[in-house]
Amino acid sequence: MKFTPTEEQLAVQRTAREVAERLLAPKAAARDVSGEFPVAELAELGRLGLLGIAVSDELGGAGAGTIAYSLAMQELARVDASVAVAVSVTNMVAELIAKNGTPAQAATWVTPLVSPDGGLCCGAFALSEPEAGSDPAALRTTAVKTATGWRLDGTKQWITSGSHAGVIVVWAVTDAAAGHKGISAFLVPGKATGLTVARLEEKLGLHGSSTAQLVLDGVEVGDDAILGAPGRGFALAMMALDGGRIGIASQAVGIARGALEAAVRYAKDRKTFGQAIIQHQAVGAMLADAATWLDAAALMTLRAAHLKESGKPFGQQAAMAKLFASEHAWKICDIALQVHGGYGYVRDFPVERMLRDVRVTRIYEGTSEIQRIVIARNLLRSVA
Ligand SMILES: Cc1cc2nc3c(=O)[nH]c(=O)nc-3n(C[C@H](O)[C@H](O)[C@H](O)COP(=O)(O)OP(=O)(O)OC[C@H]3O[C@@H](n4cnc5c(N)ncnc54)[C@H](O)[C@@H]3O)c2cc1C
């Protein structure tokens, strides 16, 4: 067992840390207030190869694998979780199309998505609907066959980057009688006629990430827009979400690391009763718990990434990593805020933003309750 990243993984991590400090850190607090979508920042991250980290270099990606992806995500989220989630979804969409699309689909969508100045800004993953979140098989968007392709109608809810994405993977029912085997995935241009942003959600955190309700009203796409075979959509979504959970676990670890670092810095500076507050056992103990949870979460996340990169089953480990990392990142951010006292509750310090941003990691790409269901099902299968 090796615990040392390769030179390539370290190089990707260094690149992500450098760009996070140089480009994201100065504007993270302002972006939280303005809600401005980070178009220019995503373009720069694309130039540095961070939008297709695990996508092969033949397709324009960095070809650096899932561990490098996790390390980079942690670095970006440590500084600005809003940008990190757009990067995470774009990587997920690029990988999904690269692995399951035709060569023509990969050339049309993946290369422009991950390459410098490809012009697609980012990708979006449109599975959830107003009445279908934890239970995506209940989705109602339809795709009806036409003479030249498919016509899509329906409403998608909570779509990260849905207002800016150049390509959106849209899941729709193509055969209502076939249950989840009647769901297919379609590659829809962000500017497709009939596709509108009906609403942008006002959220607790992640203010620099757009979360859109998308309405598809007679959106026409060609036969070449279907990803994989008709009826394969649900399986593709589940596969993508398994990998996506490594991204969200990495995001949780990154935010928690940012919060813990801020708390330790503050605890060394702030004095009460004549000494730095970190010297008070109660404060030191809180920070010790936080550091221990953070280490466990990071190791679990990297183990899931390692399994995925090695081509081994990783669904169980990804669900465990997402569950543990998101639940504990929330607690770590809460400790970081507590250590700041009253100053933790105001915008002069970053920890209140981090606490708000981290909360959603327990909800999206499968709530903690759904992760527990996934884990328990695997336990059931594992015992003869
Ligand atoms: C900021 C944000 C960004 C998002 N981005 C995207 C995106 O890009 N693409 C996308 O497709 N979706 C996205 N989502 C949607 C997200 O994945 C869903 O919100 C999530 O899966 C939960 O679905 P729901 O909101 O419909 O809650 P529900 O499914 O209605 O669940 C409500 C509550 O019931 C619990 N629950 C439900 N079923 C069970 C069960 N069987 N057992 C125990 N408890 C259960 C849940 O855990 C939860 O606590 C995003 C959501 C948010 C908030």
Image (cartoon, grey):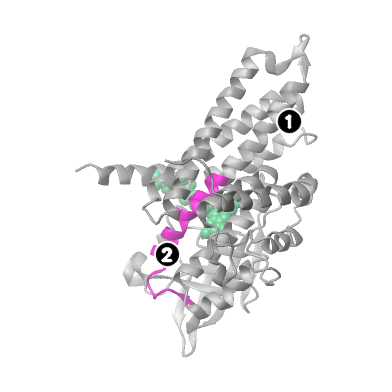
**Callout 1 environment at 10 Å: few (<14), some (14 to 19), or many (20+)?**
some
State the residue lying farthest toward the front: 7
**Image location (x, y in percent) of residue 65:** 52, 57
- Where is the C terminus found, in terms of image quarters? top left
Q: Which residue is mark 2?
A: 236
Let me know if residue 377 appears in the view.
Answer: yes
Q: Which residues are magenta?
A: 226-250
- Where is the N terminus found, in terms of image quarters? top left
**Image location (x, y in percent) of residue 177:** 32, 71
Amino acid residing under circle 1:
Tyr
* Residue 370 is a magenta residue: no
Q: Tell which of 297 and 236 is nearer to you.
A: 297
The tag earlier along the polypeptide, 1 or 2, is 2
Q: Which residue is mark 1?
A: 345
* Residue 236 is a magenta residue: yes
> In the image, is residue 383 above or below residue 236?
above
Q: Tell which of 282 and 312 is nearer to you.
A: 312
State the residue lying farthest toward the bottom: 147
